[in-house]
Image (cartoon, coloured by chain):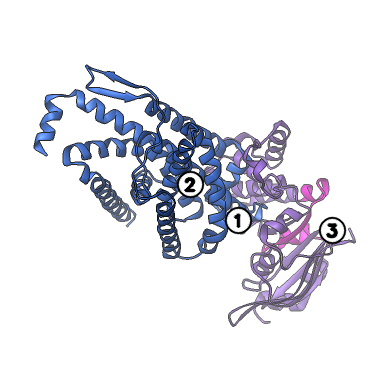
Chain colours: A purple, B blue
Amino acid sequence: MTDTVIEISGVSKSYGGVVANHNISLKVPSGGITGLIGPNGSGKTTLFNSIVGYHPIDEGSIKFKGEEISSYRVPQIARLGLLRTFQQTRIYSNMNCIDNMLISIPHRKLGFADMFKNRGDKETMEEVDRLLDFVGLYEKRRLISGDLSFGQQKLLEFAMALMNRPEVLLLDEPTAGINPTLINGLIDRLRRANEELGITLFVIEHNMRVIMNMAQSIYCLAHGELLAHGTPDEVQNDQRVIDAYLGAH
Amino acid sequence: MWDNISILTAAPVFNIQLILDGLFIGSTFALAAYGLALVWGVMNVKNLAQGDFVIMGGYVAWWLGKQGIHPLWGLPVSIVVMFVFGWVVYVTIIRRVIDKDMFTSLLATFGLAIVLAQALNLMFGPEVQTAESDFAIRSYFDNSVTVADIKLVAFGLCGVLAVAVVLFMKNSRMGQAIRATAQDARAARVMGIDTDKVYAFTFSLNAAICGAAGALISMIWVIQPFYGIGHSIRSFVIVTAAGFGNLGGVIMAGLGLGVMEQYGGFVLGAEFQQACVVGLLVAVLIYRQLEMRRHRQVVQ
């Protein structure tokens, strides 16, 4: 719990003249659930994109399990066990749920042997069924994923991420656009993934009730800078955080 | 022209010959077009050197035939040679243009097509060639219809190769990675799929498919260093008509194009055979444009 799995030091990222992240430093402890909050445009998603290698950072350092990853490409980082999900689900909408899951098998470097290797053996198919059952989509496993509701697509995306057996999962607004009934189920599954599968979660969330109940520690960004850090109680009582959300910062 | 049409009506058995020849050659067109659909759909690269890959594959089989090896052995050799060649082309050229705008990849592959045609011309000369298979030719309807056994073999092999490619795409890990990348490359990368490697495999697979089509064409038809552009246009017609990821449509369009070319060549004369293909491309593009306009109006 005390080991740091992601360590970000002095990370800055600008788009032209717009500073998206400025000198951000934070640590994500291994095995826990860490929250990342902040008003719209505060740089949360930019930071996630920097961590998973979508764009180069201007300065600073990003370490995963002590290894500098800021110069790595996206698939390299994913193969280390650091995955992310998106605000808008990115599933393969023309394929059924099973095919979506099979695509998410951990990909080592593709080689010539993969031209002849079967996409899923018996063990893999059992894992697919187990994880689809875990997120409550087993009955819909043969449906084309584009026909699922938005909430179910989010659950499928979560199951796909689990299929990849990540060590750390970056979740970008997992409850956005999901009806309240499904939200409770999703939170329960996120907790179980953390506790039972030992996956470290780093979560961007706008739903304060969700993140305050789920996370052990929370970072708050505003205007691209780190504003506050602490336990949920400390953060939600921090006057700077309140001001940022009310627009007084 | 009317004389030729009257021959077809007076002696309907000639229609059987034209249809059979069209189907046999059309199956190889469909094979090459499927490769183009793959590269176009997955990588968004419109490969203008597609036909030159086909011709190159044909020369591999023809050259082996000249060395005393039966040209049918040229099929697997051509597949392997063209796969490796496709990989080299991807690493040296395609990788640099894949994220650029459409005209960059069009120009790059057009340049490649010119270089390949000239290189084949320098190596093998400008003569029209056929790889002799020495298979029997059967006659039907009082010798009015002839079918060479090699054409039947080539037709069957086209079918086998098409099924193999479909099974590969559906069941192998690489095929799955290719399909995932085609649908959402960004999401595929996040899942750890090396899309650069997937693109390299896809382009190489396309080149291998072209090599197979070319080897078969060299045995049932003719090859010449500058015939590549014709095969490129045929592939574009078929893919534009059938759409991506529609193997059934590609097969039907390929066979249909083969038959139409045979009829066009017979009715209008052999010199109009290419014009028929280009004319069909224009017709398909106009139809697609009208279809898109109609869909837009429905949305409004």
* Mark 1 vs 3: CB contact within 8 A: no
Q: Chain of mark 1?
A: B
In space, the residues marked 2 and 3 are separated at their CA atoms by 42 Å
The amino acid pointed to by label 3 is Ser
Query: Considering the image in quadrants, where does the N terminus of chain A appear?
Result: bottom right
The amino acid pointed to by label 1 is Asp
Same chain, marks 1 and 3? no
Q: Which residues are magenta?
A: A191-216
Residue sitting nearer the eye, B238 or A146: B238
Magenta stretch encompasses residue A196 = yes
Same chain, marks 1 and 2? yes
Magenta stretch encompasses residue A72 = no
Residue position for label 1? B196
Residue sitting nearer the eye, B19 or B239: B19
Residue position for label 2? B38
Q: Where does residue B188 sit, x and y in percent of width and height? A: 61, 52
